[in-house]
Image: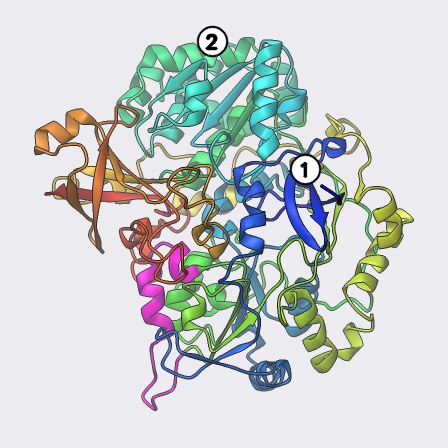
Amino acid sequence: MNGNWYPTVCYQCKAECAIEAHVVDGRVTEVRGNPKFRGKACVKGMAGVTLQYSKDRLTKPLKRVGERGEGKFAEISWAEALDTIEAKLRSLYDRGEAHKLTYSFFPHALTDPKWHFLNAYGGYINTGLPHCDSAKIVSQIKCWGGIPNHHIPPAWFTMPKDGVMLLAGRHAFGCLDDAVAARDILEAKDRGAKLVVVDPIFSPDAAKADWWIPIKPSGDTALFLGMINYLIANDLYDKKFVEEWVREGDFEKVKAHVKAMTPEAMSKICDVPARDIVRLAEMCAAAPAVGVDGFKSIMLGQALDYGHAWAIFLAITGNIDNPGGQPLPDLTPLSPVTPLPKGPAPLHDKGFHRTGPNRDKFAKYSFILEPTWYETQAIKDDGLKILLVTEANPALTEMGSREWQKAVCMKDKNGNYKLEFLLNTDIMLSETGKYADIVLPDQTHFERWELLYMPWWYNFGHGVLLRQPLVDPPGEARHSNMVFIELGKRIFPEYFQFKDDVEYYDIQLRGLGLSVKKLQEMGGRWSPGTLGFRKYRERGFGTPSKKVHLYWEDLEDIGQALPRTILAPEYEADAEKYPFIMISYRRIHINGTGPWSVNNAQLRDPASGQPTNPAIINPAAAAKLGIKDGETVTISSRTGSVTTPVKLTEHIRPDCIGIMHGFGASVGSVGAGAGVNDNDLIPDAGAHLHWQDLVGGEAHVSTRVRVSK
C-alpha cells in the first residue's frame, strides 16, 4: 500500500498520546504509537480511523428551530452562526455580566487560544477536572504548591526494583488515559517492582497485580490514615525528609491526629483487615520508592480528605519528586502572546460558584476552575447566562445529567430561557448538542493544528507536542480554536493581533527558539529530555514556607485541617432503603460520554468493542435477591432508576453494584439506545449540594442504590 506515516497526537481520549497516522490518497488508514516519543496506540486510538469517516460527522453549522432538547435544527451559514454568537457575547459583556459566561472544554494547553479568549472576555473555564481530580489537585497545591500533577500517574518508567506501585481506584489497564502507562507498569514489574491495586472491583489492573485489596467504597482515607499511624508509631517514616522538608510543627500535629487511628480502628471503616493495612505499610516503608495513583475511573467518597491523607503519606515516606514517586512538573518556557489579557483570577469573587447563594461554602474550596457539576444550580440562581461547550457532554456525562437537561430548558416569567445561550461545537451531534442554540461542526485530531502543552502529560513530560492536520475535514467543519480566534478578532482586536492558530503557536514557541515549521521538522516534539528529580533541594517547594504543609489552617473552622476518617455522607444515608453502593467504572473502549467513543462503530461493535453495559453483581448478593445471570432488574437511587440486564461476577464486592460509564445516549446512529446511563442514578448536581459533599469530594461515580426484579 502506498502512503506515508506522519507524527501527530491522538485525541480519542484526554491522554493525547503520541501517534503516527498512515495517510493514503488523502485518507487516514491506520494508527500506531510513535516509538520515538514512547507513544502507544490503544483500541480507542486505533478506532479513531472509524470515527474519522463516520456518517454522523457534522459538516455545517446548525441553528435550533424547535424547543431546547427536541433536537430540531436547520443548517445555516458560518456568517450567520458567527454573527449570532458575537451578538450574544457582546450583549452579556456590555451589561457587565461577563463572569456569567462559562466555557466547558478540555484545555489541550495552558495557553489554548480559547483560554486566551476567555481571559479577554472575563469568563471562566470548566472541565471535568472539578469533579474528577479536584481533590487531588487542591491537596497537592495546599501541601507542596506549584503546578499540580493532574490525572497522570507517577513516572512508572522510573520505578526502581522493589518499588511499590499503588493504584487506588485507578484503571490504568482499562480506562481512558495514557496508553503507555500500562506498558510501563508491566515493565516495572519485570524489573522487580510490586503492583498493588485497591479497588472494590477486580479490574484489569487487579488481574495484573501482585495484590488486590477489595476495599469498601469511601474507605480509602481510613486505609491511608491507618498506614500513616503504623508508620509513625513504629518509626518507619522518612525522618530525614520530614525533618528537612516538612514545615515545623506540622508533623507533630499529624502524629497527634492519627494517634488513635490504628490499623485495627481503621479496618472497621475501610473493611480491609488490620493485618493487611500493616503489611501494606511495611511494604511501602521498605521500598526504595512508592508511587500512588488514583482519582480516575473511581473517586469514592471523601475525596479531599483522601487527597490530603494520600499527600501526607507521600510526604512522610519521602516519595515526592523522586524516581518512582510523585513528580513535580516544571513549566516549559513558552512565550506569552501579547498583549496579554488580564483575565479572571483563579480565586476571583466572580463566577457562578462565587456569586450564588452557596458562595460562602465554595470559598472554603480552592477551585481552580468553575465546578462543572454546579452548572445546574447556577442556571437556577441566574449566575450562568451563556454556556459554551466543546468536546464535553454535560447533558450525558455529568452526575445529575437529567437535572442539567431540565435546567437548560427552564424559562423565566417572560417565557425566555434562563440560560440565554448554549453553544456546542463537536464533530457529531451529542446529547448536549440536542439542547444547544447553535451547533458548530468541529474538526478531529487528524484535521487540525494544536500545540499541546501541559506540564502533567505522562507520555511527553515537560515538553510540547504538535498536532498537525493530515487530511481535509468534511464539508465546512472548522476547529473551535479558529472559531474563537475569529470571535476574538471581532470583539477584542487588541488581544488578537495574530493571523491564525499557527502564528499564535509560533509566538509561543519563540521561548524555545522554535516555530511550528521547525517543530514539524523535529518530528513534532520538544522536550528537555529529563523529568528531573528532587528539584526542591535547590528551590524548595511552591508553598509560602518553601516546605511541605501537612496542616491546613484555612480549613480549621470546618474541621478539615487534617483528614477525617468518616465515610462520605451519601454512603451512610438511607443505607437500609438503598443497601448497595453503585460504582460507575470504565473500560478501555470508553472515553467519557462524548460522541467520540459513545458513537464509534468500532468501539461499540459486539465482536471488537463494548456494545452495552449490563450491571455487574456479586453472585452471593444476587442469590439473596433471587436474581439469575442475564435477568433484567431495576436499579433505583434516591434520584432516579434504570432498568438493565445483570451479569453475575465475583469480580466485585457483594455490597456493590457496578455500571460501566459511557452509555445511555439518545443520539447517534451507533450510540443511541445502547445501554443505560449511570448518571441517572447519581444525586442531582446543583439540586442537592450536600450530596456532593462540597469540600470533601462528591458522588460523581458512586451512590446508594437498591435492586429489584
Label 1 residue SS: loop
* Furthest residue in direction bottom, as rendered: 414
- The residue wearing badge 1 is 545
* Furthest residue in direction front, as rendered: 1
Residue 16 found in image quarter: top right
Residue in the picture at 12% in, 34% down: 627
Looking at the picture, which amino acid does disc 2 mark?
A: Asn
Rounded to the nearest angstrom, the CA distance separating label 1 from label 2 is 28 Å
Looking at the picture, which amino acid does disc 1 mark?
A: Ser
Residue in the picture at 49% in, 28% down: 253
Query: Measured from the top left, where is residue 595 in percent x and y?
Result: 47, 56
Residues drawn in magenta: 394-418
Query: Measured from the top left, where is residue 523 in percent x and y?
Result: 82, 42
Label 2 residue SS: loop
State the quadrant of the N terminus: top right
State the quadrant of the C terminus: top left
Residue 101 can be seen, yes or no: yes
Q: Taking 84 as reference, is 142 above or below it?
A: above
Residue 215 found in image quarter: top left
Query: Measured from the top left, where is residue 83 in percent x and y?
Result: 62, 85
